[in-house]
Amino acid sequence: MAKLICTFITSLDGYVADTEGNFDWSTPSDEVHTFVNDLERSVGTYLYGRRLYEVMVAWETMHLNDDAQPAVMRDYTAIWQAAEKIVYSRTLAEPLSRRTRIERSFDPEAVRALKASATANLSIGGPHLAAQAFAAGLVDEVQLFISPVVLGGGLKAVPDGLRLGLELTDEYAFRNGVVYLGYRVQH
């Protein structure tokens, strides 16, 4: 059975975007990006809400053999383009990338069935979609990249009222001050 992994890049105070929706502070260094790439290699399917998908779809147009791009970016491009994507949106008319399908609503039972049949892990992105997966008890692992910035408000990574038992499985401090924490959800 595949795992459903929720990954967030957050501020120290737990936000994924500031009060104006900006997340420019979260751009990973090459060291962090290399680490992310290694984590993402186990992912066969990405589950996205529309807004995050519209950010991530830029990886669809990056070229694997563009020497102007750093190797770490070309590596992530290959990982992202090879994976399946499911986008949950009531407004997106058609996919903007290959290997992508659109679902009009998040169906926990369909995701549970996908986890049971998948041969590679699933990754869920975006705090609104992740909140639904957390509420349904679907998330198996949480990967946090905590950036050395305090925003004081904005879009929270996890919703108010969510309570989860977590077991620390991995930790790493990067040279730029970002800290990675890997957790297993205790169901």
Image (tube, rainbow, N blue to C red):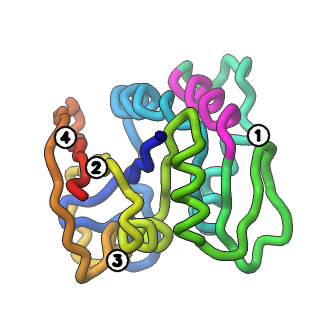
Q: Which residue is mark 1?
A: 61
Distance in Å between CA atoms under marks 2 and 4: 13 Å
Q: Which residue occupies 24% across, 42% down?
A: 182
Mark 2, Cα crowd under 10 Å, few <14 / some 14-19 / many 20+, is many
Three-letter residue code for mark 4: Gly
> Is 141 or 146 nearer to us in this picture?
141
Q: Earlier in the sequence, mark 1 or mark 2?
A: 1
- Residue under pointer 2: 144
Most common SS among magenta residues = helix
Quarter containing the C terminus: bottom left
For label 4, the SS is: loop
Q: Which residue is mark 4?
A: 177
The quarter of the picture where residue 38 lies is top left
User: Along the polypeptide, which appears first: circle 3 or circle 2?
Assistant: 2
Queried whether the magenta region covers residue 73, the answer comes back as yes
**Looking at the rendered structure, which numbered label has been put on residue 154?**
3
